[in-house]
Image (cartoon, rainbow, N blue to C red):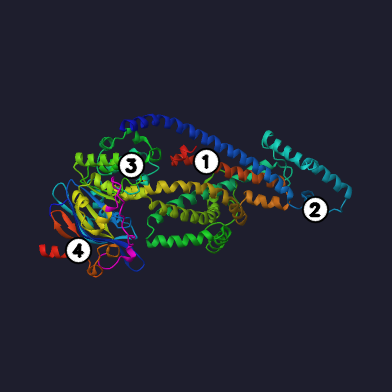
Amino acid sequence: MTANIDARADESATERQDAGRREVFQYAIRRFGVYLFTLWAAITVAFFIFRLVPGDPMNILLGNLTRAEGRQRDAAAEEAIIAHYREIFGMDDPLPLQYVNYLRKAVLGGLDLGPSFVEYPAQTKDLVFRRMPWTLGIFTTSVFLAWLIGTGLGALIGWMQRHGLSQLAVILSTLLQITPQYLVALGLIIYAGYTLRILPAGGPYARHLQPEWSWEFISSLIQHAILPMLSNMIVIGAGFTLGMRALMISVLGEDYLTFARAKGLSPFTVLKDYAFRNALIPQVTGLAIIIGATLNGTFIIEILFQYPGLGTLFVQAMGLRDFNTMQAIVLFSIFAVLTLTLIVDLALPLLDPRIRRVA
Amino acid sequence: MSGSALLEIRGLSAGLQGRRSITQVVSGVNLDVHGGEILGVVGESGCGKSTLAAAIMRLLVLPQVLQSGTMTMRLEDGKTVELMELPDNELRHLRWRHLSYIPQGSMNSLNPVLRVERQMTDTLIQHGLSKKEALDRSIAALELVNLDTKVLQSYPHELSGGMRQRVIIASAVSMRPALIVADELTTALDVVTQRQILQELAAIRDELGATIILITHDMGVVAQIADRVAVMYAGKIAELGTVNDIFEDPQHPYARGLIGSIPRESGQRVEGLQGEAPSPWNYPTGCRFHPRCPEVFERCNQHTPTLQQRAMDRWVACHLYDAETEFDG
């Protein structure tokens, strides 16, 4: 019987390692397939949704032009201009053909997403690329910082759940978590920006500066980013803190924690290797979910702080019913969110040996 | 009781902390554990045997609380320590070196994200062994439970239930502790594995000279490997004696009921115990067994019987023997 057990363990150990490697690979491939499919679905939904928004971009454009030029209306000229633009934007084709053309250009034409109305004749792609670093800079930095701080803090207050300070922290986090991001942003603008005047509360950098690799410019950049990032971090971080605390408390009730204490391990080792490591796994999944759910909050914050990111661009584009630009923004946001989520998901098997074996 | 016991438990009480008061689960347990023996502690679910195990290990967590009593442990060098009063950091050094624990939920007692090697050696390294010594000790311990050393490279989810249980036993004996508290160690296993593991445990006792407190609800397990048995009922010890004495001539009516409920080969009908074990929130007055006792009389619901010595190595807490005991004493 004993020999049997040994032989079985012998055989299965090498087999297991091979199978394990194969399964990690399959997991990565499958995950990447899901990634591509989601991206396609996002493009498709974005394409049709924005064409359902009421209001013809041509009329709005024409109205703006007329107002700008201040001329009498000339019906024939109007017709000609509209026809010209409709052709450029490919709007005379039936919708399914427009869709196929759009996809073809986007995939085969090197991300050609068409011209924009907002800054005609600038390409939508260039417009989005110019604005995207601002959004992604604020968004990713604040989400990851909030996650790091929230995870650390949550682990600590979960570990010391009966301490008075922990209970205070829970009440504070709950209050902050239910506050809408824009209220926090408005509060910060009014209090830190205008009452105390300790930090700038508008624009990406000081008005008299030009983008360059100088200390003055970079410090101005950082100072201007602090308040928008804080508005994001406070709310998201409070959520992460509460989440990690709950995970920690449930792990503390596990049998392997009792056993770890019975072994006479130092409290720090029990906290680090036994409690924290296990609570961390669902917390990383939580990060992947939050990334998708909070980008829109960042858009609102950009508008409040006059930050030249995708959020402000989107509002401009919405005003003109510029669906090319709106679509491109949605597309790139989804691309960014999906890519970040993919990275997080692929990191999970590193943390949890059990996922490596999911068939 | 003799003074040479390895562990001397006196008046040990533990309970559940409620909003206003503590509900007592274990009430004034007195128990001597002798060096080198396997002491079985048996009783129905909810009789407080696991709480007793955790109390000995000082592993109770809120809402469970230790209330009173003393637990004096004699170490190899002849010194004694009082487990109840030991500060946490000293208790930490005592654990695994002198006092080990095999937990009830063995299926979930290994950390799912660490390899077995790390989980076995991290403890040994923190107890002052070098990395190499820790690994050697772990390998030696795995051999004691007939496990291949390849399990060191496995994660717990890759092992069967029996293998996990063996890893836990190996870990618990790797520092050659004097005392091992094993709580329901075979409950989650099939009978074949159960038998093998019990044999391994007995072999470990013989080889290491360890003392084992075996908590179980299974009279069969006790009959197989225990030297002495403590029968617990409603947080108290009802009867204490050698395995032979208790199985052949149970004296407490509860012990008689338990023995009577073991199926026999002869095909006789099993006589079970009537009723249910009381929960700690409504332990009966007087003798806590009296509502279920077939031999109850008027004294039983008034007075609480104490554990009295009836013979060499024989202790019973029952009013049936009051007169004799008084006469004897």
Distance, label 2 to label 1, CA atoms, is 46 Å
Q: CA distance from mark 1 to mark 3?
A: 47 Å
The residue pinned by badge 3 equals: B191
Q: Which mark is drawn over residue A173? A: none
- What residue is rendered at 56% in x and 56% in y? A200
Residue A63 marker? 2
Q: Nearer the viewer, mark 2 or mark 1?
A: 1
Secondary structure beneath disc 1? Answer: helix
Q: Is residue A79 above or below residue A25?
A: below
- Subunit of mark 1? A
| N-term mark: 2 or 1 | 2
What's the amino acid at mark 4?
Answer: Leu
- Mark 3–mark 2 Cα distance, whole angstroms, equals 86 Å
Which residue does the numbered mark 1 point to in the structure image?
A343
Q: Are marks 2 and 4 in contact (CB under 8 Å)?
A: no
To the question of a shared chain for discs 1 and 4, the answer is no
What span is in magenta?
B260-287
Location of residue B13 with respect to A27 vertically, above or below: below
Mark 2 neighbour class, 10 Å CA radius: few under 14, some 14 to 19, many 20 or more: few
Same-chain status of marks 3 and 2: no
Distance from the alpha carbon under mark 2 to that under mark 4: 106 Å
